[in-house]
Amino acid sequence: MDARAWMLAGTIHARGRTGRADADVAAVTGWSALALLGVHRSASTRAQVAIPEARRVTGGPRLQVIRSRRLSAADITSVHGVPTMRAAPALRVLAGAGVSRERLTSLAIDVLQAGATTLAELDGLASSTGRFPGRGRLSDAVTSLRAAGRTDSPLELRARRVLRSAGIPLDRGQVPVTLPDGGRLHLDLGIAAIRFGIEVDSFAWHSTRSHLDADARRSNVVSALGGWRVLRLTWSMIETGDELSSFLADVRQVVATQAQYHLGVPWPRPSDVVA
């Protein structure tokens, strides 16, 4: 029996046969829900299923029952025929289970990238009047993403924090580049006013040859445009002290050179950076 079948069997078991719609509601939740929604690579070894708090249903080797005060039909969708909690409520459950702020931030990026929710929905959930365990951590995660602007990976967000803490200014969100044919692409980080960008190479994103090739073509297109400079940053460069110091020195040199060339100043002014 595959994972989806175990989850379906779990929801059927947890749903029960009381005949009351409010009591019979049940849905795959937590890590299991994110796996079914396609935004997490692996599910729990047990199907995690949410039921109303008033119900009493036993779990088992293949079923973890999570009783919830807030379970409602509006929180549930159907994935491959399995009643599944939507991404935002599933993150609320994981926040209540003690998942760290950093991990919640990473998961929020994943669900946003997958189009499974919106930042506005997550923000509304985190700022709702109802209290729930982990609300502070989820709120912090949403706040950091809103401040950063468009962010496509946890490594990109970490790189932004490292660069900003080193005193290097960056535009909010990604940097748009207009192509000769009128098209547009976006660099992960940078300063549009001085035509400077940074591409953050995450192993998760470059895990296939097609992704690696696409990013290489993208960098070549930008490099062929007049006046643009693009640097590349990897996870190992952030993690290795000497490499990070060297990279930050390269960034400062390029930023200064580009600012002088494009703006006639030795370093970008606050007004040159998109806030």
Image (cartoon, helix red, strand yellow):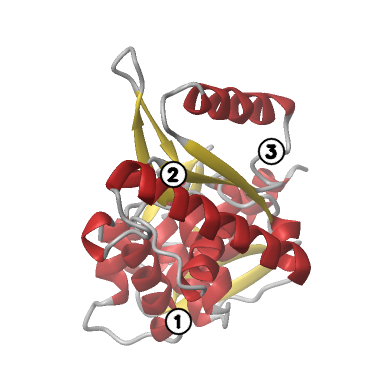
**The disc labelled 3 sits on which kind of residue?**
His
Mark nearer the N terminus (2 vs 3)? 2
Q: Earlier in the sequence, mark 3 or mark 1?
A: 1
Q: Is residue 225 left or right of residue 46?
A: left
Give the CA distance from mark 3 to mark 1: 29 Å
Q: Looking at this view, is 52 or 146 the one in front?
A: 146
Tag 2–tag 1 contact (CB < 8 Å): no
Q: Quadrant of the C terminus?
A: bottom left
- Label 3 or label 1, whichever lies nearer to me, is 3
Residue 206 badge = 3
| Nearer the camera: disc 2 or disc 1 | 2
Secondary element type, mark 1: helix
Choose between 253 and 54: the one closer to the eye.
253
For label 3, the crowd category at 10 Å Cα-Cα, with few meaning under 14, some 14 to 19 and many 20 or more, is: some
Dot 1 crowding, Cα within 10 Å, few <14, some 14–19, many 20+: many
* Residue at x-position 55% and y-position 65%: 158
Residue topped by disc 2: 196
- Does residue 104 appear in this view? yes
- Residue ID at (37%, 60%): 267
Residue assigned mark 1: 137
Depth check: give the residue in front, 214 or 192.
192
Do residues under tags 2 and 3 come within 8 Å of each other at their CB atoms?
no
Q: Amino acid at mark 1?
A: Arg
Question: Is 235 situated above or below 240?
Answer: above
Q: Residue 82: where, in percent of width, then height?
A: 52, 46
Relative to 202, is 60 above or below?
below
Q: Classify 74 as above or below 147.
A: above
Instruction: Place residue 11 in its image quadrant.
Output: bottom right
Q: Which one is in front, 246 or 261? A: 261
Between marks 2 and 3 in the image, the one whose residue lies nearer the viewer? 2
